[in-house]
Amino acid sequence: MKELQETTFPERVKEIAEICGAPIPYEVDWESLKDDMEALNFIDNLSCHRLNMALRVICQDELGKEAVRDGLQQIKLKNVKSKDEMSLAFSGGVLEMHCAYALRTDGMFSDNEIRNLLIEKL
């Protein structure tokens, strides 16, 4: 958990800044992850990596970069236990992803789903 907090997430914020031109912070519900080693192992790949892939497509031109910089202010991540608890929402500049990280790829949203939601709401 410490490595995620001190290394992984700051690196992902820098990567977002490289993609769209502005750092967008993560807020992680660490309480939802504390007893779930499997979820901790997969949160970066299943949320951060997928989001960055979606952002790369949106930010291919200056118009896309501007839309992301102006519209996306924060990313909130929460671990849930089952697929039926999963949700993906974007409102008020906040992208919220509640994923079942321990289910690996069965517990995530694809970069296409993330991208489509952002494009629709930005």
Image: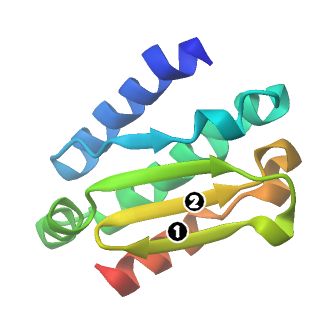
Q: Are marks 1 and 2 in contact (CB under 8 Å)?
A: yes
Quadrant of the image containing the C terminus: bottom left
Residue at the location (24% across, 40% down)? 18
In the rendered image, residue 82, in percent from the top left (x then y), is placed at 87, 59
Q: Secondary structure at mark 2?
A: strand
Tell us which disc is closer to us: 1 or 2: 2
Q: Residue at x 51, y 73 (%)?
A: 89
Tell me where residue 26 sits by quadrant. top left
Q: Is residue 102 left or right of residue 110?
A: right
Q: Is residue 80 left or right of residue 57?
A: right
Q: Nearer the viewer, residue 50 or 9?
A: 9
> Residue at image x 33%, y 68%?
58
Q: Which residue is mark 1?
A: 114
Q: Are there few (<14), some (14-19), or many (20+) residues within 10 Å of tag 2?
A: many
* Colouring used for the render: rainbow
> Which mark identifies residue 13?
none
Of the two numbered discs 1 and 2 on the same chain, state the one appearing first in sequence: 2
Please name the residue that numbered disc 2 is placed on: 97
Which amino acid does the dot numbered 1 rest on? Ile
Q: Could you tell me residue 41's position as x and y percent?
A: 74, 28
Query: In the figure, is residue 12 to the left or right of 103?
Result: left
Disc 1/disc 2 C-alpha distance (Å): 9 Å
Characterize the local packing of mark 1: few (<14), some (14-19) or many (20 or more) Cα atoms within 10 angstroms. many
